[in-house]
Image: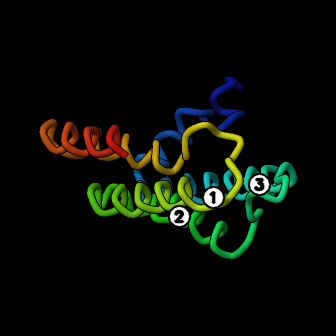
Amino acid sequence: MRVEERLGRGPAAVVGWLRAHPLLADGLLAVLLAAVSLIALGYAGKDCDGGCRPGDAGAVALVLLQTLPLAWRRRHPLAIPLVAGLASAAYGVAPYPDLTMSVPIGGLVAAYTTAAWCSRRTALIVGGVIAVI
């Protein structure tokens, strides 16, 4: 029996399945990023010295707004980055602890989405707005 038969064609089968189901793939990505970001929020809150509000409902809501809308990123390549970007900016100015990542990962994936799925002109405009923010 060949190795591919025993492993079910391996990674190629998984990649093929994800390409055939883009909404589900994006949903899995969104849930994974939300989980990682919420775990980072939990750990970042332990380092607060009274100057920030760790893990309250507002912080959790903003983290979820940065990540969960990514499930619809291919269907709405401008609206979803706008939501994720505004949530990232709001989190950055709010008195919440810095996450362990230097860049909000949801905002980064959203920016990539615009570059990958929109015209070059639109991607440059959105990149300029991100740079200013």
Residue 29 placed where, x, y %?
55, 52
Q: Quick one: SS at disc 2?
A: helix
Q: Judge whether residue 27 can be spotted in this image.
A: no
Q: In whole angstroms, how far apart are the C-alphas of marks 1 and 3?
A: 9 Å
Instruction: Please name the amino acid that badge 2 sits on.
Output: Leu
Residue of label 2: 68
Q: In whole angstroms, how far apart are the C-alphas of marks 2 and 1?
A: 6 Å
Q: Quick one: SS at disc 1?
A: helix
Mark 1 nearby-residue class (10 Å; few <14, some 14–19, many ≥20): many
Mark 2 or mark 1: name the one nearer the start of the chain.
Answer: 1
Residue 78 placed where, x, y %?
26, 57
Instruction: Please name the amino acid that badge 1 sits on.
Output: Ala
Query: What colouring does the structure picture have?
Result: rainbow
Apparent side of residue 31 relative to residue 114 in the rendered image (left or right) = right
Q: Are marks 2 and 1 in contact (CB under 8 Å)?
A: yes
Residue of label 1: 34
Residue 2 placed where, x, y %?
67, 23
Instruction: Tell me the mark number nearer the camera, choosing from 3 and 2.
Output: 3
- Name the residue at the front extreme: 51
Please tell me whether residue 5 is drawn above or below residue 113 in the rendered image. above
Residue 14 placed where, x, y %?
56, 42
Disc sitting over residue 39 in the figure: 3
Q: Nearer the viewer, residue 110 or 129?
A: 129
Q: Residue at x 53, y 56 (%)?
A: 93
Task: Please identify the quarter of the rendering in which residue 105 is found.
Answer: top right
Apparent side of residue 125 relative to residue 15 in the rendered image (left or right) = left
Mark 2 nearby-residue class (10 Å; few <14, some 14–19, many ≥20): many
Disc sitting over residue 106 in the figure: none
Please tell me whether residue 42 is drawn above or below residue 4 in the rendered image. below
Instruction: Please name the amino acid that badge 3 sits on.
Output: Ile
Q: Residue at x 25, y 45 (%)?
A: 126
